[in-house]
Amino acid sequence: MVVEWTDTALSVADKTLIYTYFTYGQMQADKLRSEFRKVTQRIERFPRLGPVEYHIHKEGEYRYIIIFKILKVIYRIDNPEHISIITIWDCRRNPDDLENNVSKN
């Protein structure tokens, strides 16, 4: 099983880490980075662990895992051997905007 972060997901993760660092400090940024790694490992072992993301109406099986109560790591199961992490979504945002922010990578 291969889990690949898309360019969009990497960019959003980097921005989130930078914001976390400057707002909450190095320790919280390190915790968030560690959570990103853990989520990747969990998805790799158990691809259908996260619930289906019903706010995305595009072709494919979109799922998510919540970290720190406010961030969704949204991923797509492309085939039995490949998963793409699509984006990181702040749950405080309007869920109707989610589909517009997810591009088919």
Image (tube, helix red, strand yellow):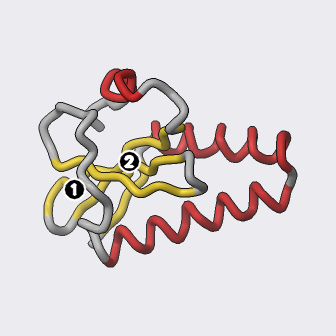
**Left of 34 or right of it: where is 27?**
right
Q: Residue at x 65, y 41 (%)?
A: 16
Residue highlighted by disc 2: 74
Residue 41 spot, x, y in % from top left: 44, 73
Number of marks in picture: 2
**Image quarter in which the N terminus is found:** bottom left
Q: Residue at x 46, y 37 (%)?
A: 8
Q: Which mark is residue 77?
A: 1
Eye-nearest disc, 2 or 1: 2
Residue 99 spot, x, y in % from top left: 31, 27
**Left of 96 or right of it: where is 87?**
right
Residue 10 spot, x, y in % from top left: 53, 45
Q: Residue furthest bottom?
A: 45
Residue 21 spot, x, y in % from top left: 81, 47
Choose between 68 and 28: the one closer to the eye.
68
Q: Secondary structure at mark 2?
A: strand
Q: Residue at x 85, y 41 (%)?
A: 22
Choose between 57 and 8: the one closer to the eye.
57
**Left of 98 or right of it: where is 78?**
left
Near mark 1 (Cα within 10 A), the count class, few <14, some 14-19 or many ≥20, is some
